[in-house]
Image: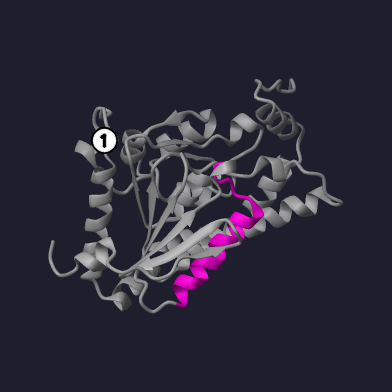
Amino acid sequence: MGESDSDVRGGVGEKETRFADAVRYRREGIAAHITLDTPANRNALSTPLVTGLREAFAAVAADPGARVVLLGHTGGTFCAGADLSEASASASDPGEAVAERTRVFLDLLRVILTADEPVIAVVDGHARAGGVGLVASCDFAVATQRATFGVTEVRLGLAPAMISLPLRHRMTPRALLRHMLTGEKFGPAEAFRSGLLSHASEGEYGERAESEPSDAIGGLTADLVGSLRKSSPAGVAATKKLAVAPLLADLDAEGAHVAQVSAKMFLGEDAGEGMTAFLERREPSWAVR
């Protein structure tokens, strides 16, 4: 590679910082690496993880050397969605607790969307429910062959209310409706065809390789960062604002409504059964309507 190699692949990186004991942050060249790091609970959207993500993006905003963000993860899961153990925990006011979690999650999506720097989701494992929403909120998304995705809320007695906002701006309408209503698992090929992933690798996600193509996705990510390095930071920031304006308008117009729908579903009978069944590793028994 040329003279930009150290900016793309690293060089001497700055000291790593850990936020909320859940998210790791470091910068290498122009790339800020934000890593979800609670693999014990599959990087679920717990209060510490969401707090850590917000603090990490604040660190990016305060770092004049950061020009692109790589959002990755440790463990075999990018993000499992809501932390169901936290969501099902008792509270003095369950309704207010759920409403607060929905507000905080919507604010996190806004933080990602309004960052001046392009954000690249790098998925090397499973993304489910709110985790798919994180991917959709990023400006670019790449994945390895072993990545899987699922908009699984309906299988827990919930609705993908909040994540429907970024998803409908990324995925084709038919594909989105199918995945939102069925909760089916799908791979990187379908994710790319439907628009959830912005970039393809390994022959546009052809036959699954015998060995994991981690070098391929690393090269793809490095090439993307290298291309962004050639772009004016001010031009990139202004262009991103233009590109995400329709999604932000939807967030402003519908955020309160989708948060209300999400909170109502979390407190419903089906959600109680769905989350309990998930935690007990059994099939749910849905109420007859």
Q: Where does the N terminus fall, quadrant-wise?
A: bottom left
Which contiguous range is marked in magenta?
A: 42-62
Q: Please tell me whether residue 250 is drawn above or below residue 44 in the rendered image.
A: below
Q: Please tell me whether residue 83 is drawn above or below residue 105 in the rendered image.
A: above
- Residue 255 seen in the current view: no
Q: Which residue is mark 1?
A: 205
Which is nearer the eye, 26 or 261?
Answer: 26
| Spot occupied by residue 137 in the image (x, y as percentages of width and height) | 45, 55
Which is nearer the eye, 126 or 253?
Answer: 126
The answer to whether residue 253 is left or right of residue 266 is left
Whether residue 14 appears in magenta in the rendering, the answer is: no
Q: Please tell me whether residue 277 is drawn above or below residue 132 in the rendered image.
A: above
Magenta: predominant secondary structure element?
helix
Coloration of the structure image = one colour
Residue 9 figure quarter? bottom left
- Residue 187 seen in the current view: yes
Residue that extends furthest to the right in the rendered view of this protein: 92
| Spot occupied by residue 85 in the image (x, y as percentages of width and height) | 70, 41
Q: What residue is at 49 percent from the left and 60 percent from the top?
A: 24
Amino acid type, callout 1 = Tyr
| Spot occupied by residue 289 in the image (x, y as percentages of width and height) | 74, 23
The answer to whether residue 238 is left or right of residue 219 is right
Residue 276 figure quarter? top right
Q: What residue is at 75 percent from the left and 33 percent from the top?
A: 272
Residue 49 figure quarter? bottom right
Which is nearer the eye, 125 or 211?
Answer: 211
